[in-house]
Amino acid sequence: MLSVRAEKYRPVTLANIEDLPEWRRLDPEVQEAVRVVAQVLPFRTNTYVVQQLIDWSRVPEDPIFVLTFPQKDMLDEEDFVRIRDMLRAGAPKAAINEVVHEIRLRLNPHPAGQLTHNVPVFEGRRLEGLQHKYRETVLVFPSPGQVCHAFCTYCFRWAQFVGEPDLRMAINESQDLTDYLRAHPEVTDVLFTGGDPMVMKTSVLERFIRPLLDETFAHVQDIRIGTKALAYWPSRFFDDRVLKLFEEVVAAGRHLAVMAHFTHPRELETDEVREAIRLIRSTGAEIRTQSPVVAHINDNAEAWAQKWKEEVKLGLIPYYMFVERDTGPKRFFEVPLARAWSIFRDAYKQVPGLARTVRGPSMSAFPGKVRVVGVTTLGSEQVFVLEFLQGRNPDWVGRPFFAKFDEKATWLDDLRPYGSEKFFYEDELAEMTRQGLSG
C-alpha cells in the first residue's frame, strides 16, 4: 500500500515554459540565455523538478536549476551571440537550424567510439541500437526510451535528444537483442539505457525484458536499468505492473539492478523518492547509484559525502563517481582530474564502510573505464596512479599504470605516460582499432 499519494506532474519545455510562475519571475537575461542555449542543447524538465527540487530563492545558482536549465556559458561566447542575434532578428527557423547543426558537430556528439567502434555487427548488419564495448556487457537503447523525464544539462548522451537522426542510437524491437545474445553466451550483463528506459510504457519495458528470463538466456545473469526517473519522476515506480515485472525478474533467478543517477543530495529528500525507493527494494531489486562530478552542481566533498551517507541510510549502494565526458558543454562542467580525485578522497574518508562500495573518479574513455587511484611521488616527480576498471581487453583491468601529474588535465587524452613513451595498452589498442573492434 502506498504511503505517498502519486501527484500528477507534467513536462516543461520551451513550448509551455511561460505557464510556470517561477519562470515568469526570472531575470529576462536568464530567460533569454535558456532560450538561446536550448536551440543547440536539449532542454526538458517537469513540474516535479520545478516544484519539489529547485530552491527558487537561490536561482540562478541553485544546483538543481543549473542541473536542469541550460546555462549561458554552456556555449562558446561566439556561438551564443550568433544564435542570440539570430533569434532577436527573427531569423528563419531553417537558417537557425543550419547554424545549430554546425555547432553540434563541433561538440563531439558521440565520444569514446560510441558510433565508430562500439556498435556490434551481427550477420553482416550493424545493430545500431546496441553497444558492446566490454566482453560481458551489452548496452541496449530501446527506441521508445530515447528521451528522459527531464534532461541533465551535463548529459553526455545529449545527441540522442536533439532530433537529428544521424546522431541517434536506437533499437526498435527486442528481436535484434535476443538474436545477438543467443549468439554471444559470453554476455552476462544487459544494461537498458537511453535516454531513460523508464519513460517507456510498462508494456514496452516488459517486451524488452521478459524474453531474457527464458532459459535460453540463462547466461544473462544481470539485468540493469539505467535511469534518472528516481530523481526526476519517482512516481513512475508507483505502478504495480512495473513492480510485478521487477519481482518476475528476481523470481527467475536474475539479478536486477536499478542504476539510479543521483547528482545531488537534494534529489533524495522528497517523500516521493523515498517511497519509490521503498517499493523498488520490496521487489528484491537493488538500487546502485552513480553520477559524474560536475562543476557548479556537486564539485565539493560535502555534497558527495552527504549523498553517499543518505543513500546508504535508504538502502542504496553507492557505485560510481564519474568524470564528466569529453562531449557537449564539457568546458562548463568539467573538473580537473586532480581536483576530482581530491573531492572523491575527501568525501570517501567521511563516510562509513558501507558507503565505500563507490569507485572513482572514473573516466569512460575510448580504451575503457580508467580510474584515478590517486596522486603520489615517484623519485622526485609527482604522478597520477591509474587503473582500468573495464577495458576493451579484459587483461588490462586492475593493472596499475602511471601518468605525469598535470593539474589542468581533465581527461585521459590530456595525460602523458610516466617512465615510457606510451601507455602500456596503446599499441594493442591501435592494432585492435585497425582490425575492427566490433564483431
Image (cartoon, rainbow, N blue to C red):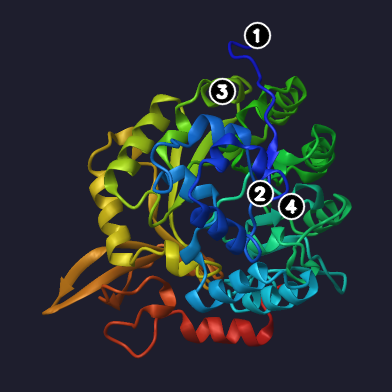
Of the residues under marks 4 and 2, which one precedes in the sequence?
A: 4
Residue at (41% x, 44% y) in the render: 62
Gap between marks 4 and 2, in whole Å?
14 Å
Residue where numbered disc 3 is placed:
272
Query: Which mark is in front, 3 or 2?
Result: 3
Residue at (39% x, 25% y) in the render: 313
Percent of width and height locating residue 31:
55, 53
Q: Nearer the viewer, residue 141 or 10?
A: 10
Gap between marks 4 and 3, in whole Å?
24 Å
Residue 383, by quadrant, is bottom left
Percent of width and height locating residue 439:
74, 72
**Is 191 placed above or below 338 here?**
above
Residue where numbered disc 1 is placed:
1
Residue where numbered disc 2 is placed:
191
Query: Which mark is in front, 1 or 3?
Result: 3
- Mark 3 crowdedness (10 Å alpha carbons): few <14, some 14-19, many ≥20: many
Residue 117 in view of the camera: no
Q: Residue furthest left?
A: 380
The three-letter code of the residue at mark 1 reads Met
Q: Residue furthest bottom?
A: 421
Of the residues under marks 3 and 2, which one precedes in the sequence?
A: 2
Q: For numbered disc 4, what is the local secondary structure?
A: loop
Q: For numbered disc 3, what is the local secondary structure?
A: helix
Q: Nearer the viewer, residue 360 or 185?
A: 360
Q: For numbered disc 2, what is the local secondary structure?
A: strand
Residue where numbered disc 4 is placed:
146
Gap between marks 1 and 4, in whole Å?
31 Å
Residue 114 in view of the camera: yes
The three-letter code of the residue at mark 2 reads Leu
